[in-house]
Image (cartoon, rainbow, N blue to C red):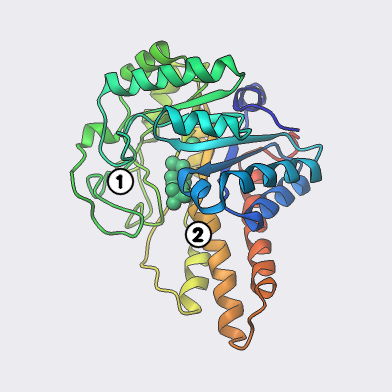
Amino acid sequence: ARITLRQLLDHAAEHGYGVPAFNMNNMEQGLAIMEAAEETKSPVILQASRGARAYANDVVLAKLIDALVEIHPDIPVCMHLDHGNNEATCVTAIQYGFTSVMMDGSLKEDGKSPADYSYNSGITRRVVDMAHWGGVSVEGEIGVLGSLESGGGEQEDGHGVEGAISHDQLLTDPVQAEQFVRDTHVDALAVAMGTSHGAYKFSRKPDGAVLAMNVIEEIHRRLPNMHLVMHGSSSVPEDLQEIINKYGGQMKPTWGVPVEEIQRGIKHGVRKINIDTDNRMALTGAIRKVLTENPSEFDPRKYLTPAMAAMKKLCKERFEQFGTAGNA
Ligand code: G3H
Ligand code: 13P
Ligand code: NA
Ligand code: ZN
């Protein structure tokens, strides 16, 4: 059944587990995530970005979710908008059946430049008021995602970006987080503690200097009842890097967020853990393997079936590691 983020995360908080929020762009990802949820008896958060909505078409996504919910009637499903950039993006997601939206006002509408506090709190509050009329949950974000190692200037492909983001903005200020929750009434709060989106987060295994889990602990002390969200939470597993590179890919050496750090976060109020890159890597590694070993193959099912299996395996691991398994 379809449920809201608030319902799902209240249960997670009560029972002390976290829930991975997996990005979804197509049928294969949807089927893989749901089979992993079914086999581990896990509640699930499916999230679609603006890019996913443009890629798949809102109508296709909406009917795909209907189908996934119908196939798996016993699995609680939250359908969430990832990184909404304005009121309209959030309202239209709700019209298509999303039960939760993220209004990311930490960045301006372009999704790139950092926004000031009053812009963020104002637009987030407007979305909360509107969404709550319809019983839809809202995630807000305070602080800007970005690598402390590179001063925020790191993009998904490992290349630098223009417009440096200051070190302070890369870590959520716990006092400002408290104010933001009071001003906006969000159901869940994304915070920044040194992670970034994409595969190139850290150039070595992260320590406390670059992955500031102490910030999460301080925010949780001040806001013990708030559901915290970790973005950029892919672990970028070495074995997936190896598979991709073994079969003709060119990923540079890199580190993601260790699962044990996420588990530490879950002990301190982290309830939603956003993962996209790990699944992209699982799919791509499996597809590269099939096409490299069988260059004459051109039936998409021959590479998409193992790709789904690789993604399902990764999703099942995360459901087990975050304590989600068994809670559906
Ligand atoms: O926020 C980043 C997620 O990985 C979604 O990425 O905007 O390319 O769909 P996307
Ligand atoms: P990753 O790139 O680490 O998978 O993060 C995804 C994310 O935060 C989506 O909002
Ligand atoms: Na999100
Ligand atoms: Zn994100």
- Pointer 2: what residue? 237
Residue under the point 56% across and 62% down: 282
Dot 2: element: loop
* Amino acid on which disc 2 is placed: Pro
At mark 1, the secondary structure is loop
The answer to whether residue 257 is visible is no
Q: Can you see residue 45?
A: yes
- On residue 121, the disc is none
Eye-nearest disc, 1 or 2: 1
Quarter of the figure that contains the C terminus: top right
Residue 58: x %, y % from top left: 57, 44
Please name the residue shown 53% across and 20% down the image: 131
Pointer 1: what residue?
A: 147
Give how far apart the Cα atoms at labels 1 and 2 are.
18 Å
Q: Image point 60% across, 18% down: which residue?
A: 134
**Where residue 294 sits in the image (x, y, percent)?**
62, 86
Identify which residue, 52 or 19, lies in the foreground: 52
Q: Quadrant of the N terminus?
A: top right
**Farthest residue, direction top:** 182
Which label's residue is closer to the chain start, 1 or 2? 1
